Image (tube, rainbow, N blue to C red):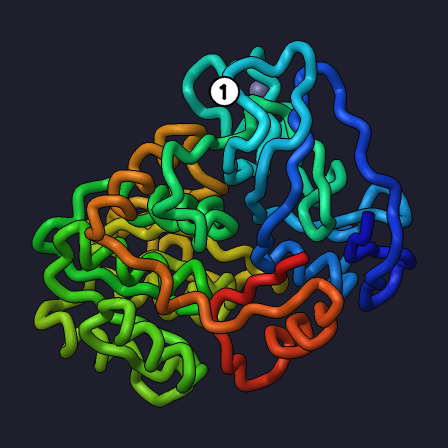
Amino acid sequence: MKAILKTSRSRGASYRDAQTPVIAKDELLIRVTAASISPSDLAIHNHAGPGFATPTLPFAFGQEFCGEVVEIGSLAKGFDKGDFVSVESHIFCGVCGQCRNDQRHICQNLRVIGRDVPGGLAEYAAVPARCAWKHTDDSLKDIGAIMGPFGSSVHAVLSEDLVGRSVLISGVAPQGLFAAAIAKAGGAKRVIALDSSDYRRKLALKMGADVAMDSSAADCVGRIHKACGQEGVDAVIEMSGGAKAIALGLKALRPGGRFVAFGLPVENLNLDYAGDIVKRGIRLEGVAGREIFRSWYKMESLLKSGAVDPRPAVTHTFAFKDFKKAFALINSKDKRCGKVILKP
Ligand SMILES: [Zn+2]
């Protein structure tokens, strides 16, 4: 098969021949029909740090993908050849304390498809059957690759009731764009999007945000307070991971508000922990991935009912062989893209 491979411990990747995966008894072989580029894929491609080095070389990365089941292991139940599936990239063990408490997404023994084991930027991928989500019809086939990241935004936004609330979405890269649409569908009275990219701010408005603000402009906190019509937003969904944005988000929040920490900072944070969090009674909630499979049921319902349409956030599609153009676009300074999809 052909795959987009990490072949060295340096920036970049190669599109070349690779061994077609051989499935284990509990796995499915998926013929990949589409993959979207995740922030982790980007970090692995860019060789952003020791945390993003793949375990072996060459290595097919790619965490977000969908495709057709073409082979079924003898212990993999519930699937037929030809089934269309999206992939949950988190391989949970099923026996640790978190798994047994319905928190499989933060499993103690978590492995990630496309990071710890080969992934979906390849014509074929082997995935444990318990990580496959079977589509019952073709209505979501065109967005099958983005189910995982969309589910993370569903989990981040809807873990608490937002009806009548004002919400700041800090960072409207694809996760934030999805979050804006989900917050609106969830009944938020005011959704404010914050980003330095003009292109992405326009996309956020298209996705349902009521207001889109430039995070690099002066007095963001004052303008956010004015836009939400009260002394701070009820909830901040922090998707950017930027140190400045995190500090700003905490200041923009009203006392007693909810701060959802999703974006991963790469620099050290310098926060007024006592003043901004403790004394103001802020509820801080870390969100990693999505609930397996509770978030998937929620997103299927949101998507099939038409309550949320993530399609405007998908702005570009490239062939696998043109993967360099796709990564260059996401790496570009002005970020003139939403979600980017690659197809074999
Ligand atoms: Zn576990």
Question: To which quarter of the image does residue 177 belong?
Answer: bottom left
Residue displayed at 88% across by 53% down: 17
Left or right for 256, reference 219:
left
Residue displayed at 73% across by 73% down: 324
Left or right for 164, reference 273:
left
Q: Is residue 195 above or below residue 307?
A: below
Q: Position of residue 106 (x, y in %)?
A: 52, 30
Q: Position of residue 163 (x, y in %)?
A: 11, 49
Q: Residue furthest bottom?
A: 218
Please tell me whether mark 1 sits on a helix, a strand or a loop.
Answer: helix
Camera-side residue: 282 or 85?
85
Residue type, mark 1 in image? Gln
Left or right for 86, reference 167:
right
Q: Is mark 1 within 8 Å of ligand 1?
A: yes
Q: Is residue 37 above or below residue 33?
A: below
Let me know if residue 75 appears in the view.
Answer: yes
Q: Position of residue 63 (x, y in %)?
A: 62, 47
Residue displayed at 50% across by 25% down: 104
Number of marks in the rendered image: 1
- Residue wearing tag 1: 98
